């Protein structure tokens, strides 16, 4: 009997070792796909880039207080076209005075995963498409690391116009765009939302908590699971954080797989 238990323990160790090796291999492939050629090591200094909020109750951040209407929307594509038409040549905030184009969003109108970022940058303002600059190229590689192409997801931002000099969006600008974001979410009805960066996460969860404390957990926005993580632009400046994003993306992949199962 002792010998049998020893064999069983050895088999379990082999199984655990195989799982660890498989996870390590997947992580190394992820790093390679996003352009990393050296293993990242954590910085010694304290990360203060996102320290803009204050602690709040878990009940407040784990469930958005804003429910969806009970009515069933029309076909997703037609509904999105209606929302874009309603947005029009928007003059609802001061960003209309400095933008080139409105960046509404693009992708699969029946996407299971919706990516929500902060706002357009220079390249997006020129092309009228979300996430087409260097941060967008990194986002594409991150999606590919969990076997998703851009065309399979829907991508948009909290605000639809570029702030001058890429400054942070201001509260009145976010509030002017928020009704249209909600309508986009209602039209698409994704299974999962990935909130990229502080402003996307704070806006959806109605919190001022910092992204460093929000990421790594799952939240609910009207029964849609929300996974906050770092914005790709932040990763370009802080490549040591890519390991944490990899962990977040694995959670998203598992959530999507659970829904398919």
Image: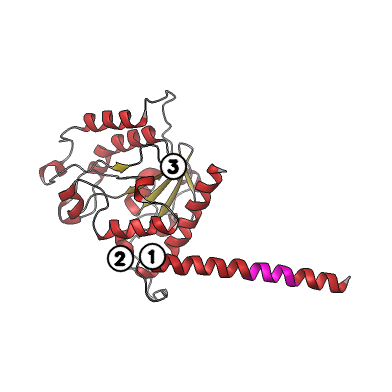
Q: CA distance from mark 1 to mark 3?
A: 23 Å
Q: Is residue 75 above or below residue 112?
A: above
Is 57 on the left or on the right of 74, as rendered? right
In this rendering, the label closer to the viewer, 1 or 2: 1
Q: Residues within 10 Å of mark 3 (few under 14, many from 20)?
A: some
The image quarter in which residue 77 lies: top left
Most extreme residue toward the right, as rendered? Answer: 1
Give whichever of discs 2 and 3 has the lower sequence position: 3
Quadrant including the N terminus: bottom right
In this rendering, the label closer to the viewer, 2 or 3: 3
Q: Secondary structure at mark 1?
A: helix
Q: Could you tell me what secondary structure mostly forms the magenta stretch?
A: helix
- Residue located at (49% from left, 57% from top): 250
Is 246 on the left or on the right of 98, as rendered? right
In this rendering, the label closer to the viewer, 1 or 3: 1
* Residue 112, numbered circle: 3
| Label 1 sits on residue | 33
Q: CA distance from mark 1 to mark 2?
A: 14 Å
Please report the bounds of the magenta region as a residue range: 10-17
Q: Residues within 10 Å of mark 1 (few under 14, many from 20)?
A: some
Q: Secondary structure at mark 3?
A: loop
On the question of residue 208 being in view, the answer is no
In this rendered view, identify the residue nearer to me: 25 or 238.
25
| Label 2 sits on residue | 236
Residue 126, x across and y down, in percent: 15, 50
**Magenta run includes residue 15:** yes
Residue 110, x across and y down, in percent: 40, 37
């Amino acid at each position: 009997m002792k010998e049998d238990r020893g064999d069983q323990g050895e088999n379990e160790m082999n199984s655990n070792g195989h799982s660890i090796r498989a996870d390590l291999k997947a992580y190394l492939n992820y790093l390679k796909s996003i352009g990393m050629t050296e293993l990242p090591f954590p910085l010694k200094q304290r990360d203060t880039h996102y320290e803009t909020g204050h602690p709040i109750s878990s009940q407040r951040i784990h469930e958005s207080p804003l429910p969806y209407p009970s009515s069933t929307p029309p076909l997703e594509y037609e509904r999105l076209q209606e929302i874009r038409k309603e947005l029009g040549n928007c003059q609802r905030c001061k960003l209309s005075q400095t933008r080139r184009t409105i960046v509404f969003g693009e992708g699969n109108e029946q996407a299971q995963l919706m990516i929500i970022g902060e706002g357009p940058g220079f390249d997006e303002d020129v092309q009228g498409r979300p996430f087409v600059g260097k941060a967008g190229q990194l986002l594409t590689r991150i999606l590919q690391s969990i076997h998703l192409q851009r065309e399979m997801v829907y991508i948009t931002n909290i605000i639809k116009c570029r702030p001058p000099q890429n400054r942070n969006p201001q509260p009145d600008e976010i509030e002017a765009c928020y009704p249209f974001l909600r309508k986009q979410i209602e039209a698409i009805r994704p299974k999962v939302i990935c909130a990229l960066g502080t402003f996307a996460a704070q806006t959806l969860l109605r919190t001022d908590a910092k992204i460093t404390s929000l990421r790594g957990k799952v939240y609910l926005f009207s029964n849609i699971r929300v996974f906050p993580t770092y914005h790709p632009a932040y990763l370009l400046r802080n490549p040591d954080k890519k390991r944490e994003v990899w962990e977040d993306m694995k959670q998203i992949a598992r959530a999507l797989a659970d829904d398919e199962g």
